[in-house]
Amino acid sequence: MEPDENAENSSEPLGASEGVQPLNDPDPENAGTVTMNRLGENMRSSDQPLNVVADSLVGEILDGKYGIVKRLGVGGMSVVYQARDLSLGRNVAIKMMPLQSGHTMQDMLRFQQEAKTISRLHHPNLVTVFDFSTQTMPPYLVMEYIEGSSLAEVISDDGALSLLRGIKALRQICSALKHAHENGVVHRDLKPANILMEQTKDHEEIVKIVDFGIAKILQADNADVLDFTQSGEILGSPLYMSPEQCQGKKLDHRADIYSLGCVMYAIFVGSPPFQGPTAFETIQKHMHEQPVSISSRRKDLAHAIELDSVLFKAMAKEPEQRYQTAEEFDEALAKIGLTDGSAGFGTLKAMINLNFSRAAAKKSRGMPASTFWLMFLVSMTIGGASLWHALDTHNSEESVKRWPEINYDGQRAFDTGDYPRAEMLLTWGLKQAQRSGSQPRIAASLKELIDLSSVLGDQAKVTEYSSQLSSSPEDTKIALRTYRIVAVAQSDLAEVQKALKTLPKGADGEARRLKLQRKIAVIIGDCRQLLVRKQEAHLFTVITGPNAMRCLEILRETRTVCKQLTGEKHPLYGRLLHTLALAYLATSQPDLAEKCFESAEELLKTSTSVPPLERAEYLSDAAHFFQMHGNVEKAVQALEKELELAGGPESNSVTAGAICFQLAELYNSMHESEKANHYAQLAQDILEKTQDNNLNTLRAFLLLYKRDFSQCLAQADQSLRENEKKEVKDYWTLSALLSIIASCYAHDKVSVEKAIPLLKRAIAINERGDEPFAQMRRLQKLAEAYALCGKNDQRLTAYLSAQKIAERLYGSSSPALAELLKDIGDAQLDAGNREQAENYLRKAVVILKEGSANPYLYKQCLLKLAGVLSLTGRLAESDELKTRASTVSK
């Protein structure tokens, strides 16, 4: 009988024309059942093709139980029918081998294995198997019938998913994979076409993984499980295959982790991560290239950089560098902080709310269920099933449980200066982390050991641990993200340079000119990402290192292009100058940085097209620069303008509170106590009105400023302990908290010894994190602590180390260097080195000169130098310096 393509539209009962029992008579005694050959000894060998009649069943009753309603789709490996379960009165989907020559005995066995595999999985996010028969010819599989769209269709019709919808869908998939993997099943063909987004009656969405046609089970003790995958055979869909799968290597569950990373990319970008013109070229990309980051492709997507972090780890080339379980993947997604937990492991509901406009649009399109089944069947031309057993890993529960405790105890020993105990615990913690396979824990352990080895002066171990860390997935993903940002910026710049040469006149030319301006704005934004690391509130640090030089080169070229495109009066040119100033700052060219900051501010302050908050951010950068380079008056001016643009203290915003605190610190350094106390009170009032825990470090800074040491110590120590217990630590905040606590201890000689190991650790963290500004400041604090302990040699060593950093950052004539030179002069004098003290103080005086931006410091340096000259009998010169000091205005 030829299949009736119009059977579903016929007014005649299904099968009546062929003498087959109609579906409204379920009596098996009267049923015209399909005859199935039994698998027996006469079956052909695996290299002989089978010719199975399985696609001519519309209108018939299968095994007396299932009425075949219509064919839903045909793939290379099987055919799927919609059918009616006659005993339970429900719709089902039945999958069996199609009528097609070329199928071998091996294909048939694979199909049987799929039935056995999927039938042992029971999870709300996996398609449910109701029944199967492997003793008939051909075997068949009865599954739940699902009305819905595949993820591939959703992406094709609607584009990339929203952040919330995408994360919740991914977490449901993680939950399903966790269940499959724990039951020894690897999917091996995870892709959007095999993921169904089903809408419920309550307008919710549930994700279902389907098609375990090439699922794998690892062998363990199960002798009756057959592995049909030949060595070197490639099974799967090239767009979503792991590198080891592309090479036909032995697979485990981590291949699914990689594929899910590819699916994640498609969810948020709208296309696969790699897509060459041929399957071979696509496979080569999986093996040798890294995907362009989500943040580069989706500038509009919140938390895109956090998604990049998850993506690059999931798609690591080596399985050992990926998330080791679907549960780890889920935990990483959960940390993005945008899910409500309802889609996590252990849930039976696993549903999410639909975007109603999209749901309505999808419903109006009336997409038949057959479309989905056809979609995932198309991919079945490559396949087979093999099976895996549970891995005999050494991820002992004890190791997993003990690591947080071991790591935390090691850090506390580090903080108190008990270095032998710290080294023992942190080394042990690294071993436990390696046994657990948790990459965040391995990275955290390595970072702590690098910092400890740095403090102990063991450079060999610093190099060893740094080498391990640089090859870790955590650091690799950061390096890859950075590389991609630079590459995209360079590519955009080349595109703009090329387009400028052929820019037409008239309206078309103006439209293209605006497009090129947007490209330049993106380049500026990309470079800023690499130059500035935002911290708590509106605090930030400038990142030095090779990326800063790359950004500087890109921005210099972009400046030439921007000048040609917009002229030097356009706000875009001002934005460019400002970012260029950051690049000069990060590459230790303060003079050029200052010129760019001042030119940018002069241009931007007259522009009506620059939003106030954007200009406020630029002023914040400039204030940071002036403060770091000793020009306190200009820093104050920039901050007061920024505060005005941010809405003033009455706005009660977090930004306003942070600005007020910085102004308090600056006025305090200028010994203008009235203004300092005024801004400190404003900052306190604002911070008391917000319960944001992310501002705890700023609160501790404010308590320290007010010399409320007991409250400051309690606040900072609590925040430090919370940070130290995290697997993924915020090391900038951690180093700041260590410094704050050290300052609390250093206010008197009784407790100052406790400050020293805290500052040493903070300095090591800053050194590892390429944060020389913070490192220099904390070296100065360490020197002050040594001074209180009477350890003048160590004090001088700390100051000289800070001087090296300062000269590298500022050059030898920056006002920022003057205060440090004065402090070194004091230390040299206390050590009895009067000549050295005089030299350092003279340098400071020459740098500051008359009319200094910091008159108080200038006056102090003059008086210090006068004192040294007086000790050496040069009284006339000493008196002259004292007279000069008396004329310096406050």
Image: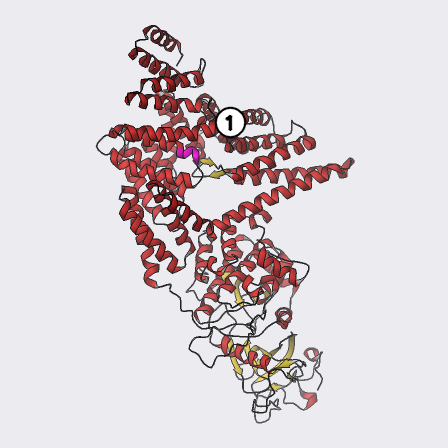
| Magenta stretch secondary structure, dominant | helix
**On the image, numbered disc 1 is attached to which residue?**
590
Does the magenta portion include 213?
A: no
The type of colouring in the image is: secondary structure
* Of the pair 837 and 444, the residue shown nearer to us: 837
In the displayed structure, would residue 145 be above or below residue 624? below
In the displayed structure, would residue 587 be above or below residue 295? above
Extreme residue toward the left, this view:
750
* Of the pair 845 and 205, the residue shown nearer to us: 845
* Of the pair 174 and 735, the residue shown nearer to us: 735
The stretch in magenta equals 771-775
Query: Quadrant location of the C terminus?
Result: top left
**Residue 216 location (% of width, % of height):** 51, 72
* Of the pair 422 and 440, the residue shown nearer to us: 422
Give me the residue at 39% from left, 53% from top: 441
- What kind of element bears circle 1? helix
Give me the residue at 38% from left, 45% from top: 460
**Residue 694 location (% of width, % of height):** 40, 42
- Is any atom of residue 593 visible in this view? yes
Query: Quadrant location of the N terminus?
Result: bottom right
**Residue 773 location (% of width, % of height):** 43, 33
Extreme residue toward the bottom, this view:
29
